[in-house]
Image (cartoon, rainbow, N blue to C red):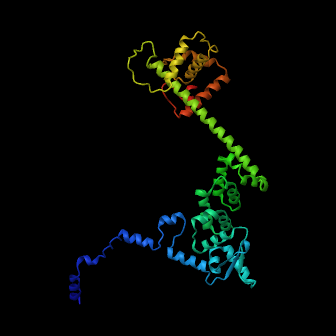
Amino acid sequence: MENTENICLDLIPAKANTIPLPPPLPKSAISSHLQKGWVSSESLERGYSCVSTATRDLWDGLFDEAYGADVSIHTDHGGIVYAHAYILGMASPVIKGILKQSKKSGRKRSISIRGVPPDAVKVFVRYLYSCRYEKEQMEEFVLPLLVLSHVYVVPQLKKECERQLGRDLLTLENVVDVFQLALLCDAPRLSLLCHRMILKNFKAVSSTDSWQAMQQSHPVLEKELLGSVIDEDNRQKKRVKRMNERKVYLELFEAMEALVHICRDGCRTIGPHNKDFKANQPPCKYAACKGLELLIRHFAGCKLRAPGGCTQCKRMWQLLELHSHLCADSDLCRVPLCRNFKDRTRKQGRKDEIKWKLLVKKILRTKGVARAPFFLTIDTIYV
């Protein structure tokens, strides 16, 4: 027996012990496979269906032909939609409860869905069968479908309605109506999107018919929205104010850097008295140098140089005093009057000292630096 097994093993090729991998399908086969009805992952992400087209067609045919239907759904204008109790009950726990009650009472099982267009009810029931809808139907009946999916607890359809409204179907004309429905249907994300859109386009939204209708039916909601508009306007003003303040503080910091640069190194045509200016100099990297150069030239030749006598000179005095509050060492500083302002600071009142400290702190905080040439942090300056 052992010899027979050894002979058999010897006759089997070595490669036969491993199962070879199947070759990949050709592209034509893959495309034909998809054409037969399988939905790709991309289609699933779009929210239509995750089953084959043949299966979906079978469910749609069952709904359209109403073969063996045992439930009648009554809609407005005398419309009737026939359906199957087991499918409706599995898709909606609310409908399941209604059908159980009608079965106990011995009546013919029927459901009344009124207050929405009859065609919207058909789209809703069709979705319960195949989780499928047509794009045009969703665009036309998205609001009734949102209400029906909430009332009859169909979370998948509700989520899809919210997604479609958030993507393409939310407009200035219907945003007020959608906002009210989102509040009633417990759709917080959708209500937030609507709320933001109303605040952003309040002037246009407030002139629509939907807003006028809301004024009559929900005055409390209108009052809350108006309050939100006022709050948003105040927040916007505060943001603009902070941005403008930040811009001013950055400009002051750049002016301080340019002032030190001019007085220590010189820039183009202005600088220390012992500076040797060359004819062709590279462009200055400090953006504030040009304006500060003009201000210094005016300050040097102005007849009303005393503080308060000239607006431009007053600005120059303020820049020099600000520099003295930022300067780390007046003995090494080349900026004019730095030591004088340092001595004057010691004689200033408490109120002025706090004012300058606060300004220096905001400038350094806005720039996001703690140390620069001739600059130190607040704590170091005022030890």
Q: Position of residue 200 (x, y in %)?
A: 65, 47
> In the image, is 166 to the left or to the right of 267?
right
Q: Position of residue 296 (x, y in %)?
A: 52, 16
Residue lying at 47% horizontally and 20% vertically, measured from the top left: 262
Furthest residue in direction top, as rendered: 303
Between 346 and 78, the one nearer to me in the picture: 78
Residue lying at 20% horizontally and 82% vertically, measured from the top left: 10
Placement of 14 over or under 7, stated as above or below: above
Quadrant assignment for the C terminus: top right
Asked if residue 159 can be seen in this view, the reply is no
Q: Position of residue 56 (x, y in %)?
A: 54, 75
- The image quarter containing residue 117 is bottom right
Q: How many marks?
A: 0
Asked if residue 23 can be seen in this view, the reply is yes
Between 376 and 275, the one nearer to me in the picture: 275
Between 159 and 256, the one nearer to me in the picture: 159
Residue lying at 65% horizontally and 47% vertically, measured from the top left: 201
Quadrant assignment for the N terminus: bottom left
- The image quarter containing residue 304 is top right
Q: Position of residue 6 (x, y in %)?
A: 22, 84
